[in-house]
Amino acid sequence: MAHAEEIQLQIRDEGFPEHDSGDDDRAWLESAATATRGANRRGVRWWVLMLVDMLMLLCGEAMAPLLGRLYYNSGGNSTWMATLAQSAGSPLLLIPLLILTPRPAAGGEHRPAVSKAKMAAICVGLGLIIGCDNLMYSYAMLYLPVSTFSLVAATQLAFNAVTSRLINAQRFTALTFNSVVVLTFSAALLGVGASSASGDDDGTSGSSSSSGGSKRALGFVMTLSASAVYALILSLFEVTFDKVVRTRTLWWVLTMQVYTHAVASVVSVAALFVSGEWSKIPAEAAAFKHGRAAYVATLVGIAVGWQAAALGAVRLVARVSSLFANVAGTVALPLVPVFAVAMFGDRMTGIKVLAMLMAVWGFLSYVYQHYLDERHADEWKRRSPADCRMCAERADEKPCPAPAGSCASSGLRRLNI
Ligand SMILES: Nc1nc2[nH]cnc2c(=O)[nH]1
């Protein structure tokens, strides 16, 4: 018991001074009621903002790869230019970043300033990894047809399940597990369906038979590696928000995206010059199938599309988790062929419909789990301080069942003793 008291004291010393008079249960109940009302009010706004982030991610993930393929199919040949386009749109985000001012963390608690040197090192590291992912993605699109690409890219969710478990201590329930499995099968089904319909050569990229099996093998390895690296990137963003920045405001999301993508762009520009591809760009633009203006418009579209996708993804990482951001992104894989039906008059098949329905099912499964978690957290917020004290006084070494932060208004923190 002495141990438990020691822990209580220690926790009280750590924060929430306005509630340190732990005996004042009435005050606690009032503050809990206010917090719950606040949470409910934030609830609708939160879901609407999440929908906006998802739309940004889905539109970007659907539009950017289609334009990437248009670039290669219309005469574009520079993998470094295709790589640069994926990160070059980040200066666009300077506009909202300069308008916004950094907001203090929710609750107004004092937090030590984030070390600039540490953030610079993180942004350089993440930027280099993003640059590698972009390069692998460019090779993947160049060497693999859409069908095989979708099939292999479906693995990114499984990779994310591993990275988020190892790096972010993601909790897996039956619903989140179901979401990962169903979405992976949905994207894979699409790949199988497309390859059986087209003999795995849908002519959408430079991977015609003349390119040879070695290029296709390289495309396969690049897609698989990019899928793993993308999962790692999302998990590293999440762990940075959790452990380094320790807040998840829009200002920090924009800051991290602008700086990491700036690093990726600098590396891509340097590689464009060093590789000599730069000298071929004017001829490539002049010979572009739809003209020079279309060449520029395609690259600008790729840049804007990837920034929208990345912003949506990082916002979802900050709002929910890296796994959820990947779940939402994977929904885009089966949506692309359905968009192609509407935009390019492609044939609608039973497999495309089934893949899309499975994607929606997998996605809703994760959203429902998140809704249950929120409700569980709200229930804990409504409990009396005695419940929280019970946790603190438990001497059985078991973790507290309350969700993180839910004991905050009683002056006690969630315990993991
Ligand atoms: N590998 C990979 N890279 C990305 N960059 C932006 N989106 C993606 C994605 O879905 N996969």
Image: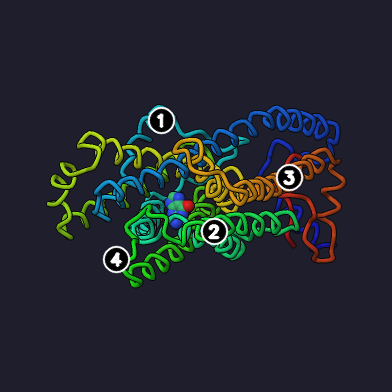
How far separated are the C-alphas under marks 2 and 1? 33 Å
In this orientation, which residue lies closer to the viewer: 172 or 279?
279
Residue identified by numbered label 1? 96
**Disc marking residue 154:** 2
The amino acid at mark 2 is: Ala
Q: Earlier in the sequence, mark 1 or mark 4?
A: 1
How far separated are the C-alphas under marks 1 and 4? 47 Å
How far separated are the C-alphas under marks 4 and 3? 48 Å
Which secondary structure lies at badge 2?
loop
* Residue 153 image point, x, y percent: 49, 59
Q: Earlier in the sequence, mark 3 or mark 2?
A: 2
Q: Earlier in the sequence, mark 3 or mark 1?
A: 1
Check mark 1 vs ligand 1: CB closer than 8 Å? yes or no: no
The quadrant the C terminus occupies is bottom right
Residue found at x 22% / y 33%: 293
The amino acid at mark 3 is: Tyr
